[in-house]
Amino acid sequence: MMAAQRTPETLIDRLPPGRGRLTENADLSKVTWFRVGGPAEVLFRPEDKDDLADFLRGTPADVPLTVMGVGSNLLVRDGGVEGVVIRLGREFARVEIDGTDVRAGAGAPDVNVALTCRDHGVGGLEFLRGIPGTIGGALRMNAGAYGREIKDVLVEAEAVDRSGNVHRVQAADLGLEYRKSAAPEDWIFTTALLRGTAEDKAVIAKRLAAVSEARSETQPVKSRTGGSTFKNPPGAKAWELIDAAGCRGLKRGGAMVSEQHCNFLINTGGATAADLEGLGEEVRRRVEQASGVVLDWEIKRIGRHAERKSEGAS
Ligand SMILES: Cc1cc2nc3c(=O)[nH]c(=O)nc-3n(C[C@H](O)[C@H](O)[C@H](O)COP(=O)(O)OP(=O)(O)OC[C@H]3O[C@@H](n4cnc5c(N)ncnc54)[C@H](O)[C@@H]3O)c2cc1C
């Protein structure tokens, strides 16, 4: 008699079921701005904060966890992401206004926060209009534009850690600096309390229009991109160094340095993540050669490189 064959345990079998949605082998290229990248081994979309905390509590410690917003600052590598990728669901997208206080879920798009503030006469958050990410991504990256950053309007934030514990922290304790936060790596932000100032709605609307106009004039906002590729080095502008190194319009496979804003990389259609990352590294090499400055990636690169096919293999 033949012994019964045991099916090998897959990752999803080791995870708590949760109330939210668990998807195996989820294509991340559909949900990142660059439209490249391999699959998440498992994608989890929690229903709400309790669901997220329960899931984290019940997930074995050896399972890698990655949180993403809408992937506007992410380059997911072609080999995909090992472990669980968490994307916050609809329940995390709420924006509530109380006077000049704005309570925003970490899954709320920055643009929705800016527009809700306009509708309630809350000024000072117009800069969020031009940043295509979520509040969670803005907290992790200390996102900013036109001289303002999330740290300038943040009062406190709430996060859940890997063990499912909830933390409520004051803005000053998050170590927010230029495009980074000192919050522990395992923290998943769930809400932010932001504060603006009472202002005339028409004045806010004018500022929002100016932000939109400036964006489309200076950035390839309709392209498949990841925003600024490199951080501005102290006292310099990354785009100027890239331009001076002759990289404007440089190509690799389907990846290209934007002609419009040369700190933006673009997927012109058929780029792989390897094309984009390779092009970014080539830009860094040329900038260092031309100016001696080593550029630091602002875009977060996650996941595994695709396995190379061996030459001669059929
Ligand atoms: C056209 C374009 C223009 C842009 N302009 C600007 C700009 O002016 N200023 C600017 O600062 N950025 C800009 N960006 C970059 C990007 O929009 C921001 O960094 C944004 O804050 C990222 O948010 P996200 O939700 O897309 O995060 P993702 O790109 O999905 O993730 C970015 C990082 O945040 C982490 N993260 C996401 N959600 C959470 C969470 N809930 N808890 C903990 N960590 C989390 C991820 O793990 C990752 O490390 C631009 C991007 C594009 C494509």
Image: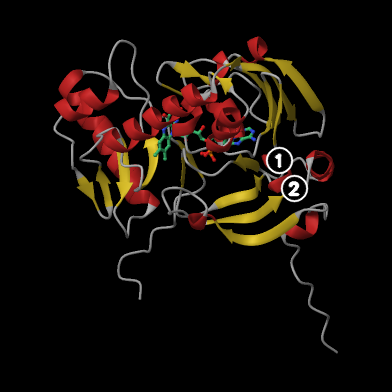
Residue 218 picture location, percent across and down: 28, 33
Residue 92 tag number: 1
Mark 2 and mark 1 residues within 8 Å of each other at the beta carbon = yes
- Of labels 2 and 1, earlier in sequence is 2
Residue found at x 27% / y 31%: 284
Q: Is residue 190 visible?
A: yes
Given residues 206 and 310, the one toward you in this image is: 206
Residue name at image x 46 percent, y 53 percent: 37
Residue nearest the viewer, comparing 72 with 111: 111
Q: Position of residue 87 (x, y in %)?
A: 64, 46
Q: Amino acid at mark 2?
A: Pro
Q: Amino acid at mark 1?
A: Phe
* Residue 153 locus on image (x, y percent): 59, 17
Depth check, mark 2 against mark 1: the one in front is: 1
Is residue 7 or residue 130 the one in the foreground?
130
Q: Look at the image and tell me whether residue 11 can be seen.
A: no
User: Looking at the rendered structure, which numbered label has been put on residue 46?
Assistant: 2
Q: CB at mark 2 closer than 8 A to ligand 1? A: no
> What's the colour scheme?
secondary structure
Quarter of the image containing the N terminus?
bottom right
User: At 59% across and 26% down in the image, what residue appears?
Assistant: 139
